[in-house]
Image: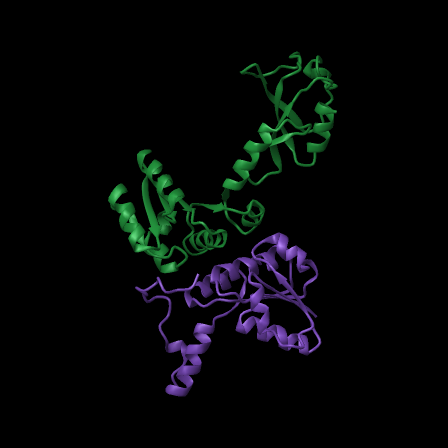
Chain colours: A purple, B green
């Protein structure tokens, strides 16, 4: 399988390294060449400096023949944009995007983008340890107002 | 008309100012509260502090009843998300996104954004109109179609110079709509001659652009 990963942070680098170790072909993108230091020393895939929301960069990285695409930068909007381009413009069969903001996650599920929210997953893991039996479904949902929106990553 | 302007930078500020002067109801959404206060000092209480990508912010802004949402922050991806949230969650009337990368025009369109505006493209087309070239200058593409308005300057040696319009073999479909001659606009009939120095403004399709160039410029 040929997997393209956008964002070589801790998560992106780890996913890329594990896939590469399992024998998959991997291309990983980041806007900062220093980020590639996080990759496994035996990483055999391709690294490419560039912005994954630029179609030219995606094409150069070979998106047209990618089997899967993961958007894992720090920016929610960058991730959803690149994910939609991969899915809807280039027709990549499997596309997953990281979204920190659970409110935005709902919108993008509506747009047909598969998302992972580390906020939701992290909070659930904490709850499991701190108060077993209390599940994420009982946590505040979107109907509540969140006065503090400034701290949300973009 | 009720217009939500997302992003209170220079573009958002002047856009809102013009829209207010034209008598529209306008709300600017600006993330930075200091900047929001500054805008308010100049334009009055038409500013809301918040992140326009957030569902709650757009709800509070009354996105359901907005005739238009113009996302004019400096980042293409933010503008895409603002327009998509406004469309998908609130069914806002029209959405316009400012873009930096001209290639995003087509992509945003395919992702459901009604219109895009690219300063890069505007400057580029002005430059292209300034440089004399033996090709058609694209002026405008009609929204959601492949119909383009192009301009061609008739130089010395052009095969059509001196011919009447009816004797020019144009690819089908395409039409010469206006001839610009010595500062005046002529709406041609089939008997109007084409002269050296004329600038022809034509409607054509993207497939016929090459054939039209061949027909007019040789």
Position of B40 relative to A52 (above/below): above
| Quarter of the image that includes the N terminus of chain B | top left
Identified at 32% across, 43% down, the residue is B26
Position of A118 relative to B123 (above/below): below
Measured from the top left, where is residue B78 in percent x and y?
Answer: 46, 54
Is residue A38 visible in the rendered image? The answer is: yes
The answer to which of B43 and A146 lies nearer the viewer is B43
The answer to which of A147 and B166 lies nearer the viewer is A147
Measured from the top left, where is residue A107 in percent x and y?
Answer: 46, 61
Indicate left or right for B20 with B76 as reference.
Answer: left
* Quadrant in the picture for residue B139: top right
Is residue B44 visible in the rendered image? The answer is: no
Identified at 24% across, 45% down, the residue is B41
Measured from the top left, where is residue A144 in percent x and y?
Answer: 32, 67
Measured from the top left, where is residue B167 in percent x and y?
Answer: 73, 16
Position of A122 relative to A91 (above/below): below
* Quadrant in the picture for residue A39: bottom right
Callout count: 0
Indicate left or right for A21 with A116 as reference.
Answer: right
Position of A77 relative to B126 (above/below): below
Identified at 44% across, 61% down, the residue is A154
* Quadrant in the picture for residue A48: bottom right
| Quarter of the image that includes the C terminus of chain B | top right
């Amino acid at each position: 399988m040929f997997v393209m990963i956008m964002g070589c942070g801790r998560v992106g680098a780890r996913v890329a390294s594990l896939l590469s170790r399992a024998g998959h072909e991997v291309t990983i993108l980041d806007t900062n060449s220093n980020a590639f230091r996080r990759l496994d020393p035996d990483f055999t895939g391709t690294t490419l400096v560039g912005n994954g929301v630029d179609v030219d960069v995606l094409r150069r990285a070979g998106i047209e023949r990618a089997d899967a695409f993961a958007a894992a930068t720090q920016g929610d909007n960058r991730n959803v944009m690149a994910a939609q381009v991969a899915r809807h413009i280039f027709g990549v069969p499997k596309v997953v995007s990281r979204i920190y903001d659970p409110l935005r996650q709902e919108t993008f599920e509506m747009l047909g983008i598969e998302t992972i929210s580390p906020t939701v997953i992290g909070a659930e893991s904490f709850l499991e340890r701190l108060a077993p039996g209390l599940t994420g479904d009982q946590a505040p949902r979107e109907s509540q107002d969140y006065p503090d929106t400034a701290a949300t990553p973009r | 008309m009720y217009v939500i302007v997302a992003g209170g930078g220079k573009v958002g500020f002047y856009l809102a100012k013009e829209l207010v002067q034209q008598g529209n109801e306008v709300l600017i959404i600006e993330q930075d509260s200091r900047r929001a206060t500054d805008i308010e000092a100049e334009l009055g209480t038409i500013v809301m502090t918040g992140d326009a990508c957030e569902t709650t912010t757009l709800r509070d802004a009354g996105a359901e009843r907005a005739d238009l949402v113009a996302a004019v922050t400096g980042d293409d991806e933010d503008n895409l998300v603002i327009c998509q949230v406004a469309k998908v969650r609130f069914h806002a009337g029209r959405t316009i996104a400012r873009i930096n990368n001209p290639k995003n025009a087509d992509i945003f369109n395919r992702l459901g954004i009604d219109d895009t505006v690219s300063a890069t493209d505007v400057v580029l087309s002005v430059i292209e109109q300034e440089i004399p070239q033996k090709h058609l200058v694209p002026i405008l593409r009609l929204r959601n179609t492949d119909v383009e308005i192009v301009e061609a300057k008739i130089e010395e040696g052009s095969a059509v110079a001196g011919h009447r319009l009816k004797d020019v073999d144009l690819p089908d479909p395409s039409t010469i709509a206006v001839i610009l001659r010595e500062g005046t606009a002529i709406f041609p009939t089939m008997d109007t001659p084409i002269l050296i120095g004329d600038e022809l403004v034509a409607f054509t399709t993207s497939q016929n652009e090459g054939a039209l160039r061949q027909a007019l410029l040789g």
